[in-house]
Structures are given as structure tokens and as C-alpha cells.
Amino acid sequence: ITSHIEWYLSRGVEVTAVLSLRDRSISKMGKLRDHCSMPETAGEKDELALSLMKEAMLKYGKHSSKGRPTVIAVSYEGLMQFQGVYLFDLYQQLGIKSSYLPAFEDGNEKYVRDAEEYLPSLPSLPKPKEPKTHLLPKKVITVLGPESSGTTFFASTLGAAVGILDGTGQSISRQAMSSDGEWEIQHLSLPWGWLCEEDEDINIVEALVPEECFRYERNPDLESKMAAQYFFKSRKAWQHQQPILPKDNSKEYIQNHQEEQLLSKCRNEVHIAEDSTSWTCGAKCGAGKYDGYALYPQRFSVNITSHIEWYLSRGVDIRVVLSMRDRTISSRGKQKGHCHLADVGKREDDVALSLMADAIEKYGKRGSLAEDVNGKERVIAVSYEGLMEMQEVYLYDLYHKLGINSTYAPSFHDGNKKYLVGINVEKKEQLEQGSSDRPPKPQSYVAPPSKESLLPKKIIAVFGPESSGTFFLASALGVATGAFPSEGQWSHVLLPSTNASSPTEDWGFHQNNYRRAMSLDGEWEIQHLSLPFGWLCKEASNAGAINIVEALVPAECFRYESNPELYPESAERVWHIENESKHKVHRKGEARRNHMSRFSEANAVENGVHDRMRCRNEVHIAEDSTSWT
């Protein structure tokens, strides 16, 4: 990928590589089913693909030493989850002006099942700490996402990176501040709190306040994490009865000196007070002896936009990390550990995604309110699957965005694997993507005119391991740039006929972008390259060698080495015919070779000479060149 970028930059083409990240176990199953049925070979090729992607991110990523965002990592699961919001943000990064939206059909669902095991962990009570000098930190990082979307992993990792946790398996239950008051990491699933109940309202609060000022409205005398601990101890009742809590002794409750001091700080420093006219409490304002507390429902979601504004108004530098995970998987995890009521859980997740989308639109890098906060990327969407796939490279890029100076890396244990089904040959038809039938060629079809230039002005190259979502992403970008029609595209392909001396025409219909497509005005070219790209893998070790090339050249200059006389599309169609014939009809090898030779000669005469001249003179592909590759 790195040399591919440099190859086009040296020829004056503006190039951007888009890396498609998808749950690694899912993409591996798709690869084994459709591209390479040998697990060991498939694993080796995927490792190489990830190595090439990591190298590209390090050299040409957003925060690389090269200084320009030439490589952009995109989450397939994030695209399926946020759909238009996520796609339009990508359009803006790529400089595409379009409102095109494809049909979002989540290809992951068919691979997901219920987890075989689920062992929920109890929230741990906070360790005794020295009293804080200030309740508000200098910087806050809030990690948010639907329940079971990876928020715990992200928050705990960031907590270790800034020195709040020691990296030995601890987790942040809701929020924790560093001893110097520099950082606070907040961890909030959407919603947060106790198990869901039937017919419950979806409560949305303004902000999550400092933990000293936080109480549950049900019993504000009880420290909030202690209340949660009591609840989890009574969870055997699941959600058919109310959690068992201590007797409400509020009438006899007397605050001690330390609690009085904390409430005073909540009122005066954090500005949580029932009689305030210019400040808000974040949730319901406590009254009377609870003045200074923000009182929360047992289960609530936070409005991310108002949460950001609540802290900014108090002089705190806040960033929000949105955790994206395959929605089917996170829904299964949610149903196991947080809400076994499917209808309630879906409503909660829909609200969560709406709150997250609103935050991206307003406070993302290109959000409508970004300029009001000096253009900072207050909301950063991260992919759980991307983190599991790219690991340290992906994590360190997130550190850089958040201003964290750390080399800490956790153990990366993919929590998705337990939800995934294996490959079952008998179920193959259920896993296939639709029908292979194609509509008839329209009688009015006219082949597109020759290109004025073989090199476009701008290139977007979509890379990723096989079955990682590159096909869908490249097709969407192709339509958005005008390089590919949304209803599909016809292509002129020469095929062998029964008369071996003269090839026949075949009209192939591409419902989606196949390898590349250029817009008619030569402005954009969309390239689609899985890693690796080409025919099915082979068993023999020398035949299955992993080949790495420098770049993908313009279509007119591209040939397969095994038969350079054939146009690539024709070579691929012939290969598929040969591959099918192995399972159906045995043909005589010599007759087949003669047939192919005549087909190649006819194909070469058609258009090859003119293309070769343009490739040499315009694209600088020539064997005797000393300054071009």
C-alpha cells in the first residue's frame, strides 16, 4: 500500500487509501468459504495483509510524519451501525460531495449466534483514596457506546494509558481520576445502571457529574457504587422483582463533616445547586440536605452533546470516544448480561445510536459545532473490531488523537469469537449474498468512449483482507463520485466460442464495482483491492506463494503474467470456466491450450497496440525506463 501511494504521487495523482476493518473472525470465515479453503494458507495471507495495512497507517496515516491524511481506516461495523452519518463523514474526509446512500444490509448477522458462556462481572467498589483537591479534572475522556459494545475494554485501556490503572486487569466501573487531577476517564454504556425492566421509560440525563456529586434518586443517602453492589448481590431475582436495598433511613440520616465538605465543593466548584439560575445539575438537582447532589434514575442514558457542553462550560477539556461494535454481537451480549427483554433492549439501542449520531454530527471533526471549540475533534468514533485487528497501531493512533503520551498496550482478547458460528458446508446457500442472476443487456447499451487520460486526477484505493467489506465500501464510493452507476454497469468481455478461431462477445453485468472504475470526466478513480487480490489460492507451496507488487496500475496497462495477451476480465472469465470444467467435463489439455492461444491472439489484435503506447508514454510503464517503475 505504501509503494502504491508513492507510485501514483510520483505521477502527479492525488491518492488516498481507505482501509476496510471488519471483525477478523468473520472476515476469515468469509475468506475460507469464498477465496481460500486452506486455513493455514489463508491465515498467512491475512497476516501479511494486516502487516501491509499497519505499515501504511504508520507512514501515511492521519498523524504520520508525512503530515497528510493519505490513509484512512474505516470500520465495516461502524458503517453498518451509523450508516449515513458515518458514510457522509467519510465523504467529507475524501472530498466527495454526494448524498448517495447504498442499501445497508449487514453481512455479519449470518455469522452470529448466542455466546456459549457469559460470566458477568460484579462492579468493584472504589479503593479508599486521598481526598481530591478539586472535583473537576483538567481533562475528561468519556467512553460511550451501547451495552456490550466494548466500552469497558476501551475505558480500562485508556485508564491504564494515563496512569489511573496499573494495567493488571482492573476496570473502570463508571469514572476514575488520576491522582494529580490531570485526567478523568469516564465509562458509560448507553444506558447505564441496573437491569432493564418491562414498561420502563428510557431516561436521558444531561451529563455525568463527578462521582462525589453523583447519587441514585432512589436512595441518595447511599454512595452510588455501594448501591450498585447491593443490587448485583440481589440479581438472582433477575428482573422480576426490585433489587434489595438497605432500609431508607433518610429521616434519621445525619451528614458527617467529610460529606458536608464534598457537598459544599459540589455546589461551589462544580455548580450543582438547586437554587442556581445560570448552571444546571446534569440530572435532577438534589434538594434540602441533598443540595449539591445530582440525582440519577436507576437506569439512564446520557445526552452526549449536552454532556460535552456541560463540561466545556466548567472549563474542562473533554473528549468523547464512541465505541462501535457489530450490532448483532453487542445485542446478543446485552441480552445476556444487561437486558433480556428483546423489545426494551432494541428501543434502548436505537436511542443510544441516535445520541451517538447526533454527537458525531455536532462535535465530530467536521461537526457543525466543531469550530466553536477551536476545531478540536471532541467526538471520536472507534471500532472494537478495528482495534482487535490492527491492535497497537490502531490504539496508538487513538492515543495521539486524545493527547495521551503512552506506549501501553493491553492483551488483545477478541470478545467476538464466542458469538460466531463455524463454517458449515450444508449452510453455504444461506450464507451466499443473493442470486447470481443478472438482468438482460439493454438494447440501447453503448460502450463508454475512450479515456482522455489513463491517469485520473484523484484516486481512492480501498484495501482490506478478503471478505473484510472492501466490496461494499468501494461500490458506495464509486457511486458517490460518479465513477460507477448505482444500478450497475455493463462491461464488454471477449470469451472463447465453440469455434476456436474466433472469440465471441459476452456482456458482463457488474452490480457493484469490481476492481476499479473511473468517472467519465477523469476526476475520480475508485480502486477496489482485497489483500490478496486475484484467483483462488492454491495448495502447492510454490503456487501459493504470497506475491507483493508495487502498485495497481491503470486498467489499460494491467495484465496477468500467465497470459498477457488476454484482457484481465477475459482471463478471469476463462479461468472460471476452466475451474468449473474440472468438476464437470474433462477436456483434453492440448486442445484447450490451442483454443486459448487462438483466443489470446484475437483478443490482442482488438485494442492492445494502442493501449501499450499510451501506457509507455503517459503512465511511464516501460522496460527500458531508468527513472520510472
Image (tube, helix red, strand yellow):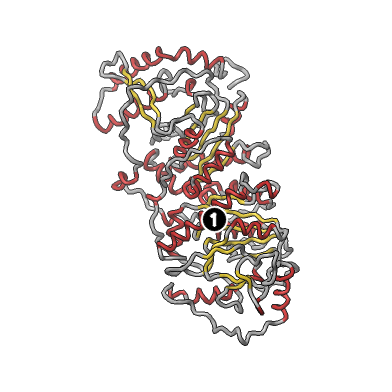
> Where's the N terminus, which quadrant?
top right
Q: Give left or right: position of 438 versus 189.
A: left
Residue type of the residue flagged with mark 1: Leu
Q: Secondary structure at mark 1?
A: helix
Crowding at dot 1, Cα within 10 Å, few <14 / some 14-19 / many 20+, comes out as some
- Specify the farthest residue to the front: 277
Position of residue 318 in the picture relative to residue 444 (left or right): right
Q: Is residue 591 visible?
A: yes
Furthest-left residue in view? 585
Q: For this rendering, which residue is in front, 400 or 242? A: 242
Residue most extreme to the bottom: 252
How many marks do you count on the picture? 1
The residue tagged 1 is 355
Q: Position of residue 141 (x, y in %)?
A: 64, 57
Where in the figure is residue 620, as x and y percent of width and height?
A: 57, 18
Identify the residue shown where x is 48% and y is 50%: 81
Residue 45 in sight in this render: no
Please tell me which residue lies in front, 316 or 398. 316
For residue 137, side relative to residue 100 (left or right) = right
Q: Assign the C terminus to one quadrant of the image.
A: top right
Please identify the quarter of the rendering in which residue 587 is found: top left
Q: Nearer the viewer, residue 120 or 280?
A: 280
